[in-house]
Amino acid sequence: MKYNWNWGIFWQLSPDGRGTYLDTLIAGLGWTLATALSAWIIALILGVIVGVIRTTPVRGLRIVGDAWVELFRNVPLLVQMFLWFFVVPELLPTSIGTWLKQLPHSAFYTAVVCLGLYTSARVAEQTRAGIQSLARGQRMAGIALGLTLPQTYRFVLLPMALRIVLPPLTSEFLNVIKNSAVALTIGLVELTASARSIQEFSFQVFEAFTAATLIYMALNLVVVTGMRWIEKRVAIPGLIGGGAAMPQAGH
Amino acid sequence: MLGGFDWDVIRRAAPYLFREGMTFTLTLTALAMLGGIVFGTLLAMMRLGSYRALATTASAYVNVMRSTPLVLVIFWFYFLVPWIGGWLLSATRPIQVGAFLSSLITFMMFEAAYYCEIMRAGIQSIPRGQMWAGYALGLSYWQTMGQIVLPQAFRNMLPVLLTQTIILFQDTSLVYVLSITDFLGAASKVAQRDGRLVEMYLFVAVVYFAISFGMSSLVKRLQLRLAVPSR
């Protein structure tokens, strides 16, 4: 029993007509990055908003925020992907649904929306934890100084909270990159899918998967190093820092 | 707008969905949790132990697993396990490995990396003096770990371990990429056979939501019970 290693495979032409197998991988990496970054922007914006409204004194807003988080956290990402891709276009009025289905790169847009909303629930949870970790006096002091509630958030609470939650946000960013692989189920040819297509065309399964794994690890390293640098720059003077003290369940 | 749907398909498919699909999903979740916690605890002990080589190996394993997407890991093991099996049994060809065994090994090995980090935090939360006290009483490393440190670490980390298991339960749906009939796979087969994607996928989402939400509410209650009462 012997596996025929052939690391030269990446320089051979692939049958998809776009150059070598290496080009296939690079194209996959491009889609992974595009999906992860776009989804991350959505997740950050929505996540901070939802996280904030979960800490406001307005009960109605809090309920909406809690429902948002529970909804997106308790359904598997793959199922959410199918809901956005197969179910949502059917529930919309026919003309909009058809337009959605015929959109070029519809898998990409679906993946971005789905991943963005899914991750926003996790970002919201971190933001809420960050705001609640602040001393209660800070909010009271802001109000006592005559700031309105939005001003208190804008100038007092959020500048502290967002810096405190930077380490857990880093791991959410890493999660977005990894979770973008789930989009292969709706036909997005991102990094994992392109490794899989190399395996299908050339049968060099372990070379293809090794290359993909190494690229994911390199991405990981870049993100972690970059975020460390940012963390250091925005560290709050006087705190022990280091963050990420509590272990978190994740994937 | 909802007129064209046939919700009765759920009632007709339910026995198949739960008997075939959910049974697979729950069995996989339970076994992968047990295997993952055992292997993860061993990894955590390796990482915290005094043997440099073991610690480096364990942390390299955990870091590789944690930076790779689960989908890619599923593919890895799907192709790798037959080769490793063939090599272990010194067969001439890669052996045949069933879908269930393959996915069980995958999830055990993958989740072990995450359980390891939880257990590591749990072990580190125990004062070091307890280890010394154990040694001073003449207990061996395994006795001290097994009877003093690990039981406390488990207890402290129980809510996080269970939360991780809920995530594992949701993650098992990804065996879909190997065309396995888990709960989602079963629903997907019926959906495509009958052309009832909307009904089936909505139903799947509701069931997953109900189970995960129910479980995490229980974990939250457990957390309140275990919490240190002061403060």
Image (cartoon, helix red, strand yellow):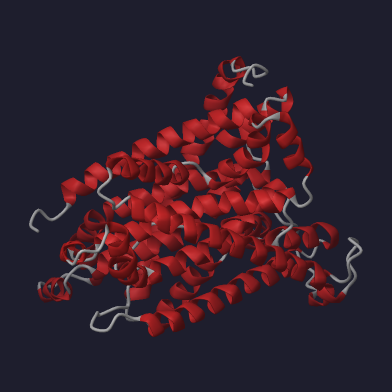
User: Which image quarter is the N terminus of chain A in?
Assistant: bottom right
Q: Is residue A145 left or right of residue B102?
A: left
- Given residues A41 and B139, the one toward you in this image is A41
- Residue A123, can we see it? no
> How many marks on residues?
0
- Single out the residue that lies furthest toward the left: B230
| Up/down of A57 relative to B90, above or below | above
- Where is residue B199? Give x, y as percent: 61, 25
- Single out the residue that lies furthest toward the front: A146
User: In which quadrant of the rendered view does residue A96 lie?
Assistant: top right
| Up/down of A218 relative to A117, above or below | below
Q: Residue at x 71, y 68 (%)?
A: A30
- Given residues A151 and B159, the one toward you in this image is A151
- Where is residue B108? Give x, y as percent: 48, 54
Q: Is residue A81 left or right of residue B137?
A: right
User: In which quadrant of the rendered view does residue B203 lie?
Assistant: top right
Q: Residue at x 32, y 81 (%)?
A: B50
- Given residues A70 and A102, the one toward you in this image is A102
User: In which quadrant of the rendered view does residue A232 lie?
Assistant: bottom left
- Where is residue A148? Give x, y as percent: 27, 59
Q: Residue at x 50, y 57 (%)?
A: A43
Q: Is residue A123 left or right of residue B199?
A: left
| Up/down of A194 relative to B141, above or below | above
| Up/down of A74 relative to A211, above or below | above
Q: Is residue A169 left or right of residue B18?
A: left
- Residue A249, can we see it? yes
- Where is residue A80? Give x, y as percent: 56, 42
